[in-house]
Image (tube, rainbow, N blue to C red):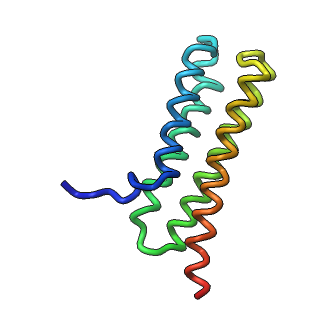
Amino acid sequence: MKKFRFREFKVYQDAREFRRTIKLMSKQKFPKNEQFCLLDQLWRALDSIVLNIAEGADRGTDKDFAHFLNNSHTSLNEVIACLDLALDDTYITVTEHQSYLTQAESLANQLTAFRKKLLSTLMK
């Protein structure tokens, strides 16, 4: 079986876990009338975080991979905005919101560090 290197990256594993956590919460807490609105947007952004890491990993250059990691980060920002809206609409509590933001911040730090590492190899 072919080995897919992106599956070994901690950032990929953590992105999958973050996706599972937020998706499960949103299934339980969001009302049905959000199914094709905020919920759909949230789920697409969650998927995009993970998928961009996977897609970028097999690009030809570190520069290309760094670009896809940046795309993952912008999708993470979109998830955070969706969580802000969920808080505003009282689908989640302030405590829950803060917990998800803490997880998102950890993931953002990993994406940034990995991207910087890839780009630093181009400078050498």
Residue at 38% over, 52% down: 7
Determine the image quadrant of residue 116. bottom right
In the image, 120: left or right of 57? right
Question: Hey, which residue is sitting farthest bottom in the picture?
Answer: 124
Q: Position of residue 16 (x, y in %)?
A: 48, 40
Q: Residue at x 41, y 73 (%)?
A: 60
In the depicted view, which residue is nearer to us: 45 or 97? 97
Q: Is residue 54 left or right of residue 37?
A: left
Q: Quadrant of the N terminus?
A: bottom left
Image coordinates of residue 53 in percent, x first then y, are 49, 54
Residue at the image position 57 percent from the left and 59 percent from the top: 69
Q: Residue furthest left?
A: 1
Asked if residue 15 lies left or right of residue 86, the reply is left
Image height check: is 59 above or below 103?
below
Q: Is residue 28 above or below residue 78?
A: above
Picture coordinates of residue 80 (x, y %)?
Answer: 71, 38
Residue shown at 55% from the left, 18% from the top: 27
